[in-house]
Amino acid sequence: MKPVIPIDKSEILKRYKPIYAKTHKGIQGHALIIGGSYGKIGAVTLSSRACLKTGCGLVTVFIPRCGYKIVQSAYPEVMVLTDISVKYITRIVFDFVPQAIGIGPGIGQDIETHTALHRFVKTNEIPLVIDADALNILSQNKQWMSFLPEKTILTPHQKELERLIGKWDSDAEKIEKTIAFSKQNNLVIVMKGAPTKIFDGDTIYENTTGNAALATAGTGDVLTGMITSLLAQSYEPIDAAIIGVYLHGLTADIALPETGYQAFLASDSIDHIGKAYLSLG
Ligand SMILES: NC(=O)C1=CN([C@@H]2O[C@H](COP(=O)(O)OP(=O)(O)OC[C@H]3O[C@@H](n4cnc5c(N)ncnc54)[C@H](OP(=O)(O)O)[C@@H]3O)[C@@H](O)[C@H]2O)[C@@H](O)CC1
Ligand SMILES: Nc1ncnc2c1ncn2[C@@H]1O[C@H](COP(=O)(O)OP(=O)(O)O)[C@@H](O)[C@H]1O
Ligand SMILES: [Mg+2]
């Protein structure tokens, strides 16, 4: 097996592109975050905020109607498109071309959402990040994997990974199965955990930032927004995954002296994205 590559500052600086002074929001990329269902609008709200804070120029969310006022009141910077259904997503339609799409946070598993996801993946060619319940739906419909754009980024936590690749008996078997899954489907797999590992076929990266403060609701939704933002800013999928995971962990390392482990919230991660970027120099 190839040696695992640590994701540290030197690895990030090889890939990070500082902002061009004459850029404008049109060049910075327009990201679309699709997710949310009744009771889980918070997930997509966090994700869209993290997406904007990571530097893309415009962010639109596609959510069920029950989330309209929630997102608009929480973050006026985020634009909102709604499904015809009130409580969950039934048909994904949008009238612009985003540079990247993140799908899944809080989306739920209603049968109509399965159908909407199927229709979406059959036609979508835009760079994609898939998380949370969209991963769970995909796990139940593995034949849809062939529709995904090459190097689509999947961000499973351990349970979601198990649903995708099946159970394992040892860490070594988990790694082997994840490599095989990444190769077979030409996907980038962000295996979330402590530490998070990223698989691009048999090339494996391991993050060096982050701490147990991240063990709190919504931090994965924040990560999805951050990676989608980087993808919308024209980073290659593997670079978006690596930089996103590193900065996300760094937000918790920087916040820790202020919040301690217990009082850290996913919103604190978003609030520290600026300092994480500044630490890159
Ligand atoms: N504010 C909101 O709107 C929020 C909305 N959210 C949305 O909720 C939806 C469901 O997402 P979810 O991840 O909570 O449910 P699910 O996939 O069943 O996993 C839970 C089980 O998996 C396991 N497990 C998890 N992590 C693990 C690990 N590192 N290592 C090992 N095991 C791990 C653990 O299983 P156990 O160990 O208990 O067997 C746990 O019980 C999704 O759409 C999401 O976006 C959330 O983001 C929260 C904030
Ligand atoms: N003990 C830990 N150390 C480092 N990172 C952690 C730890 N626990 C959780 N995380 C990180 O927090 C995030 C949790 O994601 P996820 O389980 O999808 O949460 P949610 O669905 O609530 O948003 C992942 O990025 C994971 O790597
Ligand atoms: Mg999650």
Image (spheres, helix red, strand yellow):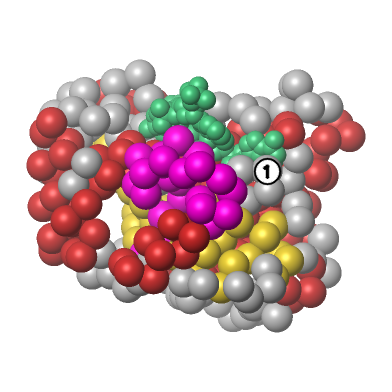
Q: On the rendered structure, is 209 left or right of 149? A: right
* Quarter containing the C terminus: bottom right
* Residue plotted at (57% across, 54% down): 172
- Mark count: 1
Question: In what quadrant of the picture does the N terminus appear?
Answer: bottom right
Asked whether residue 92 appears in the rendered view, the answer is no
| Residue pictured at 82% horizontal, 61% vertical | 279
> Extreme front residue here?
169
Q: In the picture provided, is 148 more to the left or to the right than 43? A: left
Q: Which residue is under mark 1?
A: 194
Q: Nearer the viewer, residue 280 or 2?
A: 2
Q: Residue at x 45, y 35 (%)?
A: 159
Q: Quadrant of ligand 2?
A: top right
Ligand 2 near label 1 (Cβ, under 8 Å)? yes
Magenta-drawn stretch contains 160:
yes
The question of residue 27 being in magenta is answered with: no
Residue at 73% x, 34% y: name it.
Answer: 212
Left/right placement of residue 81 relative to residue 218 reads left
- Expressed as whole percent of the image width and height from the top left, the position of residue 198 reads 56, 61
In this picture, residue 8 sits left or right of residue 22: right
Residue 81: image quadrant is: top left
Residue 13 can be seen, yes or no: yes
Residue 144 location in percent, x, y? Answer: 18, 56
Q: Which residues are magenta?
A: 151-175
Q: Which percent across, then down, holds residue 161?
A: 43, 45
Mark 1 element type: loop
Up the image or down, 155 lies above or below 27; here it is: above
Q: Nearer the viewer, residue 50 or 115?
A: 115
- Whole-percent x, y for residue 235 in the image: 51, 74
Mark 1, other Cα within 10 Å: few <14 / some 14–19 / many ≥20: some
Residue type of the residue flagged with mark 1? Ala
Relative height, residue 263 to residue 198 (above, below):
above
